[in-house]
Image: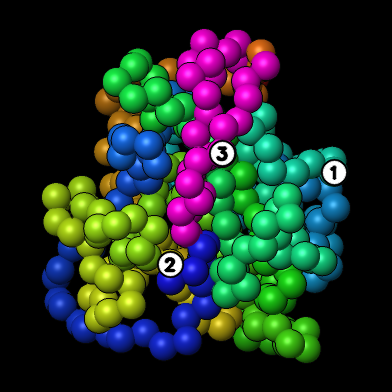
Amino acid sequence: MSAGFRLAIAIAVMSLAGEAAGYVRSTSTTDGVPLRWLESCIAVQPDGRGSQDLPIDVVNDTLARAAANWSSRTDSCSYLRLTTLPAAGPIDVAPDGRPVMVFRDQLWERSGIAHDPGAIGLTTVFHISSPGQPGDGTILDADIELNGVNYTFVTEPSTTPARPGTEVADLENTLTHELGHVQGLAHTCWDHATETPPLDDQGNPIPDCDGTVPEAIQMTTMFPTAAPGEISKRMLSDDDVRGICEVYPSSEAPPACYQEVDGGCQAQPGAPAAPLWLLALAPLALVCRRKRA
């Protein structure tokens, strides 16, 4: 499987009535600790340079709808609040505590390193990596990149054609999936980013994405493939909802809300892991000052 949220060429379906899909958490590339935010709000902002396919106001509105796809289902059971801000910038992917969404319309790469052309989107999660120390696995930032080189982003896939040489990708469908990564969820099938299949919340190894995948898992928002023009990931499965509400339960006292990291933290490159890149921050980040929202 490629990095990110990929176009499905063919999907093997096995219908298992009543089978629970489970959810999967993103983990540290260093020690496998599950990742989570230790604050109560995440606000994602589009890069003001926008997309070659859509006006910036449509991008703003679509990102807001994708966030609402989560918040409308999770706000009643989770303290984590996912919101959006209007486009500004230019802004880009960086470990700066400012979650952003960026279209790559000219080159599908970052810092000279090419992304998999089959990936519709990539989410980079920056987290503390300090094995055995307090704060290990804390998410500090999460940024989304969208592949405008190989895909045409649309909001009405049934009526909007793709640019020559590209495939149609529904923007809301894609963003709803990527926002799951922003909150700390991983794919619901094994994408070979790890040596062995991860376990779901029930302790079961998840199926291989390249094999036969139960229909219940294919129907989750966090399933990593999409047919051309698919919109089904706009609607969360019960397991997607559980993934947020059990990691960030409303029964817990919500932590503080911060906006961005401040105080001279430096990013240390971790091993790239498709489809979710987890770049560990130096242990210094554990004591960095954070600017209150």
Instruction: Tell me if 165 is positioned left or right of 83 in this view.
Output: right
Which residue is located at x 41 percent, y 62 percent? 221
Q: Which residues are magenta?
A: 264-292
| Magenta stretch encompasses residue 47 | no
| Residue pointed to by mark 3 | 269
Circle number at residue 90: 1
> Measured from the top left, where is residue 61 in percent x and y?
70, 55
Per the model, the C-alpha gap separating discs 3 and 2 is: 24 Å
> Measured from the top left, where is residue 282 in percent x and y?
52, 24
Label 1 neighbourhood size at 10 Å, few (<14), some (14-19), many (20+)? Answer: few
Per the model, the C-alpha gap separating discs 2 and 1 is: 29 Å
| Residue pointed to by mark 2 | 224
Label 3 neighbourhood size at 10 Å, few (<14), some (14-19), many (20+)? Answer: few
Which residue is located at x 25 percent, y 54 percent? 198
Q: Secondary structure under badge 1?
A: loop
Let me know if residue 252 appears in the view.
Answer: yes
Q: Specify how the rendered protein is coloured.
A: rainbow
Q: Is residue 236 above or below residue 212?
A: above
> Measured from the top left, where is residue 59 in percent x and y?
74, 58
